[in-house]
Amino acid sequence: ATFAARSRSVARIPASTITRGTLLRARCPKPVRMPPRTRSAVRGACATRTKASIADVSSPEVEVTSRVVRVGPRKIPTELITIPSDPSKEAPKYDLVIVPGNPGVPSFYEHYAKTLHNLMDGDVDIEIFGYKGHTTDRYADTTGDWFTLQDQLDHLREYLQSRKSRSRHGTVLVGHSIGAEMSLDAMDKLGTGAVRGVVGLMPFVLVNTKSALQKFLSALVHITPLVYLVAAIVGFIGALPGFFKRLAFSPITGTMSASPADLTRRWLRSDSIRNMAFMGRTEFDALTALDTSRWKRHKDRTSLLYCPGDHWAPLHQMEDFGRMKELRGMETVLESAPGVDHAFVLHDKSAELIAQRTKELLETQHAVER
């Protein structure tokens, strides 16, 4: 979902936040009169701006550990990135696990995670979860297998069950695109004792039947020979010498920030394309209807952030959630700043802004003091 959306234009409308159907100016210049059930959340969102600004953390320098682990009987390579809390924090306030969109490669989320870590004054442990078989580079023991959405759901739950939070207040999952669906599934299956809450960024939780592009992509990934053909072409280009490789991939990477562009050129391989496409096939097959009962169970522990022009997380879906009586209390937010789109991690400024919004959601809907 990340790469298919990268070229979408964003309507240039004033930056604003919509919470449960009410329009708020992002800077909250004066008190906003709202029903009692929402007022405290708005105050929390405004108060966070006094601690740190995005300009303060645009080039965050924090300790980052990246490692590759082998999972399952076949020892499939999986990448994980860890950003520990400040050493002065004996028990961090938050424990966050970031669950990427498809392709589930943690490296694309590193700048976003480092910015979020600094915005939260280092009082947080952050881990970026990697999908089984989705890696930045090809390793000598890469099998070439592809994995379904269900495989990755199982992989996430096993990973969460294997780790122990150091936080005083438990674990919150931050899921992007299909990662939001995976995070909600994990909270539902493991319980709120294991997962305190979920922040969904541009959540892909339901097939958008109104999108012609999504219908086209669904048809494409269901044609197996075509997927293999596209993967072979990408693999051939990826094997070219450096200059020619950069030139050939420039239509894809041209508007990206430097680091995401380099990661994308490394990631674009035949096995990566097959894995992304075939997992996407199972996403389209699985997300045909909402499990309303699941959403109802976790509405008070779920926050969703949307942006304009996103067919993966369309605004009409946000509006539909707002109209559902059984989901009253679930926080939905619109980020309409120019330049922010579904593939926010590919642009450093967008990643920094979404990190700020994530912090605000954590300190309102998921405030640990509650």
Image (cartoon, helix red, strand yellow):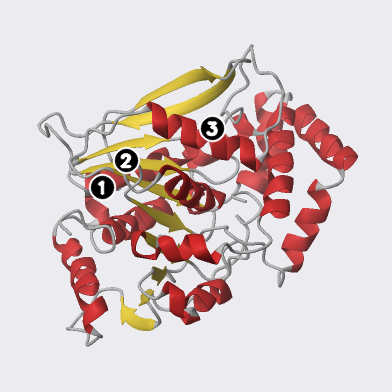
Q: CA distance from mark 3 to mark 1?
A: 33 Å
Mark 2 and mark 1 lie on one chain; the one further toward the N terminus is: 1
| Rendered location of residue 234, percent (x, y) | 76, 34
Say above or below: 363 vs 265: below
Determine contact: label 2, label 3, CB under 8 Å: no
Q: CA distance from mark 2 to mark 3?
A: 24 Å
Q: CA distance from mark 2 to mark 1?
A: 9 Å
Question: Would you name the residue on which mark 2 appears?
Answer: 114
Determine the image quadrant of residue 246: top right
Residue 37 is at least partly visible in this image: yes
Question: Would you name the residue on which mark 3 appears?
Answer: 155
Determine contact: label 2, label 1, CB under 8 Å: yes
| Rendered location of residue 332, percent (x, y) | 41, 70
Of residues 301 and 27, which is closer to you in this image?
Answer: 301
Q: Report whether 27 appears left or right of 338.
A: left
- Badge nearest the viewer, 2 or 1: 2
| Rendered location of residue 181, percent (x, y) | 53, 52
For badge 3, the amino acid type reads His
Which residue: 12% across, 34% down?
89
Determine the image quadrant of residue 126: top left
Question: Would you name the residue on which mark 1 appears?
Answer: 57
Say above or below: 55 vs 322: above
Please tell me how many numbered marks the rendered image carries.
Answer: 3
| Rendered location of residue 40, percent (x, y) | 19, 73
Task: Name the outermost residue toward the top.
Answer: 140
Of residues 319 and 341, which is closer to you in this image?
Answer: 319
Task: Name the outermost residue toward the bottom.
Answer: 33
Say above or below: 308 vs 366: below
For badge 1, the amino acid type reads Val
- Badge nearest the viewer, 3 or 1: 3
